[in-house]
Image (spheres, grey):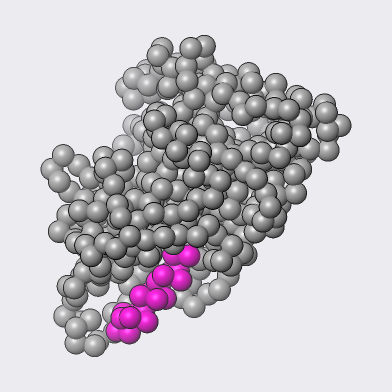
Amino acid sequence: MKKTKLLLLAGSLMLTSALAACGSNNGNGSASSSPSASVAESPSASPSESASAETGSGKPVTLNVMTNINDQQAKVLEDIARAFEQENPDINVEFSAPGAEYENIMKVKMASNAMPDVFSTHGWSKIRYADYLADLKDEAWVSQIDEAIKPAVTDESGKVYVLPMDQDKSGPVYNADVLEKFGIAVPKTWDEMIQAAETIKTKSNGEVTAFHIGGADSWPIGQFFDFFATPAFISAEKNNASQFLDGTFDWAQFDKLPQMFLDMQTRGYLNKDVLTAKYTDSAKAFAEGKAAFGIYGPYLIDEAKKINPNLKGGLMPIPSIAAGDQPTLAGGEKSTWGVWKDSPNLEAAKKFVAFYAKPENVAKVATSQILPPGLKGVTIDAGELTDDFEQYKDLRVIPYFDRVYLPNGMWDVMCKNGQDLLAGGITVREYSENMKLEYERLRSAQ
């Protein structure tokens, strides 16, 4: 998955993090506060030796580079871009990370066929951006793509759409100390999760929030719907997957998901300032033991550790909802670079992407997200999450709901209507009706 507004221009040191539809984290911690990374040698991941005539002649080339990743993770990406400039003094990089506005900006650029030279695809390389992306199959790093992420970034013809620097395997996170304090096991079902919330609320006398959500940023609210739409409608043996795909879904059935979300608020399981709190507030509450669960990804733990290095956090699968179903993880693309096929600086753009494919740079990006690397030959130390990734390695990883089952443009609908729902501006029924209207309009347009 889709986050706070931020613009990181060339030379900027501003630090202010989305999965899955999309997830990154925030904060001002230094790189040394991230989990350590180790890298195996991988000769095939060295930068491309090809470059445009302009770069070879020393004539300056300017690459426009844009990412949906923001906050501290975007700073990691930009730092690598500056290192690329140091090694390639004839190539200037205009780097931007507009955060929550990224999707809307890209829609305008697609409509005018004026894309950035290099851009991130935030889970949509094949579905949304396929016609705009150059085929990278001849790049040296392609042989290193991990088999688990390959289906998301390549097709049957052999086209390689993007460089995957990491691969999303995500779910909610929890503060292990809080759960231990109140004698709560990691929930495997929605009912267990709600019972845990009631226990935390009661035993802490309201001092600890069960679920902290930075709703002022809107994307954390969308994250709830993107996570839990899967167990609500997709992962169970009897599901609505085909109806979402063929347009026959009965949107009255969708009511149960916004109702679940609203119930969390009315029962006192969400932070009282949910509509004014930001992502950074969630990280702070999580770090201080004032929040038990985060409806984010593993990056929340990394962010919270910058405040409290002694924090014990854990990744949990998305709890099941239907009887007989099993928990799942959300997955797919996370941090990617693709090259615009009509870029006037095509070879320089490929050289830029190849620089990120160097093992040490893949490790930096994957470490900042606390996610498995997208290329083989790279390993990271994910701290206590290393055990979680091992424990859940065989669990089903299902693509983010909005990337497969909703038409382009629905992410903002989920986010904004979720805010309106909590604010009392719309009812549960109106939430689903608004989803239906936009689903039909956008599906028809596509």
Where residue 299 appears, as percent x and y from the top left, is 55, 50
| Residue situated furthest bottom in the rendering | 58
Viewer-proximal residue among 116 and 38 = 38
Say which quarter of the image contains residue 197.
Answer: top right
| Residue situated furthest right in the rendering | 205
Q: Is residue 55 left or right of residue 39?
A: left
> Is residue 277 visible to the viewer in this orientation of the structure?
no
Say which quarter of the image contains residue 312.
Answer: top right
Residue 76 to residue 60: above or below = above
* Residue for point 21% across, 69% down: 48
Viewer-proximal residue among 158 and 329 = 329
Give the magenta-colored segment's residue range.
Answer: 76-101
Residue 299 to residue 439: above or below = below
The verdict on residue 390 being magenta is no
* Residue for point 52% across, 21% down: 320
* Residue for point 67% across, 23% down: 194
Residue 87 to residue 98: above or below = below
Total numbered badges shown on the rendered structure: 0
Residue 131 to residue 238: above or below = below
> Is residue 159 visible to the viewer in this orientation of the structure?
yes
* Residue for point 43% across, 54% down: 380
Where residue 442 appears, as percent x and y from the top left, is 39, 35
Viewer-proximal residue among 237 and 417 = 237
Q: Is residue 376 left or right of residue 230?
A: left
Please state, as top left, top right, bottom left or bottom right, where the C terminus lies in the image.
top left
Say which quarter of the image contains residue 399.
Answer: top left
The verdict on residue 79 being magenta is yes
Q: Is residue 122 left or right of residue 351?
A: right
Where residue 30 appears, as percent x and y from the top left, is 58, 67
Viewer-proximal residue among 141 and 102 = 141
Where residue 254 appears, as percent x and y from the top left, is 52, 20
